[in-house]
């Protein structure tokens, strides 16, 4: 079955520290993978997406993610976190059924000043 | 994303009432979706529509119905609301591009918070 797993429910980092949010996927073929961010009271904003090609994907707000087929992972990274990055982050996959997205349960990021 | 709007943004209603949530988009996308979000569960798909004449059930369609009035409008109805339909509801649109293998990236509205008492 197609699925996306985010192992960390909640992560806390200090402002200026580096960040890595984990995501694992389970698909038969190469998936289409996305990271979305949801700020409090807001909708979901697309950070970046991977379909094919270069496995290191650059996104908005200084985020990047790396697709690793051997580990079935698509981890999100940022070298220096800002207080405004505090939000919930969702890893999302799209499999063979067009339009059908598989959401991870989300990782809540808290940033300490 | 300001190109996808949802009304109302907040709604409190009582058990048994009929409720309609509306979604409009100016992105020119053919595909539209309704999701609900519950804490710790991510988003789950209720219904989706690939064009005005195409409506499909998602993973949790029971208790819901939809209407695609136009390319830009997709409404979600709760015929007889119940408390476990209390959730945050999101509308989304996507930009399927056949020439690029179907990127189908989805763009979300700001959400409607629905409380059923």
Image (tube, rainbow, N blue to C red):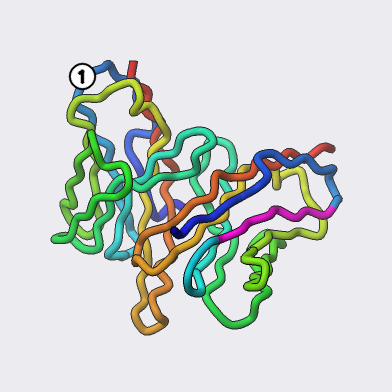
Tell me which segment is drawn in magenta.
A18-25
Q: Does the magenta stretch include residue A36?
A: no
Image quadrant assignment for residue B6 = top left
Image quadrant assignment for residue A83 = top right
Q: Write the residue at 43% across / 72% down.
A: B103
Q: Position of residue A90 (x, y in %)?
A: 57, 50
Q: Write the residue at 28% across / 37% down.
A: B21
Residue nearest the viewer, comparing B100 with B41: B41
- What subunit carries mark 1? B
Q: Where is residue B44 in the image (x, y as percent from the top left)?
A: 40, 45
Chief secondary structure of the magenta span? strand
Visible in this render: residue A38? yes
The vertical placement of B97 against A41, above or below, is below
Q: Position of residue A102 (x, y in %)?
A: 46, 55
The vertical placement of B75 against B63, above or below, is below
Residue nearest the viewer, comparing A30 with B78: A30
Per the image, label 1 sits on a secondary structure element best described as loop
Q: Position of residue A29 (x, y in %)?
A: 48, 74
Visible in this render: residue A36? no
Residue nearest the viewer, comparing B61 with A26: A26
Residue indicated by mark 1: B16
Quarter of the picture holding the C terminus of chain A: top right
Q: Write the residue at 49% across / 56% down.
A: A3
């Amino acid at each position: 079955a197609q699925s996306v797993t985010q192992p960390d429910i909640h992560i806390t980092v200090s402002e200026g520290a580096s960040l890595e949010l984990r995501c694992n996927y389970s698909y038969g073929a190469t998936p289409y993978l996305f990271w979305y961010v949801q700020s409090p009271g807001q909708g979901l904003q697309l950070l970046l997406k991977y379909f094919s090609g270069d496995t290191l994907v650059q996104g908005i707000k200084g985020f990047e993610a790396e697709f690793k087929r051997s580990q079935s992972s698509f981890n999100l990274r940022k070298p220096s976190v800002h207080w405004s990055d505090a939000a919930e982050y969702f890893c999302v996959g799209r499999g063979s059924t067009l339009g059908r997205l598989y959401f991870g349960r989300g990782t809540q990021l808290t940033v300490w000043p | 994303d300001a190109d996808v709007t949802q009304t109302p943004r907040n709604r409190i209603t009582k058990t048994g009432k009929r409720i309609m949530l509306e979604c409009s988009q100016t992105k020119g996308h053919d595909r539209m979706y309704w999701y609900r979000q519950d804490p710790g569960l991510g988003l789950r798909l209720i219904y989706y529509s690939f064009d005005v004449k195409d409506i499909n059930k998602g993973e949790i369609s029971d208790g819901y119905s939809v209407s695609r009035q136009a390319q830009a409008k997709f409404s979600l109805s709760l015929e007889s609301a119940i408390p476990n339909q209390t959730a945050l509801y999101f509308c989304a649109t996507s930009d399927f591009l056949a020439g690029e293998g179907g990127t189908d990236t989805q763009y979300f509205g700001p959400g409607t918070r629905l409380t059923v008492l």
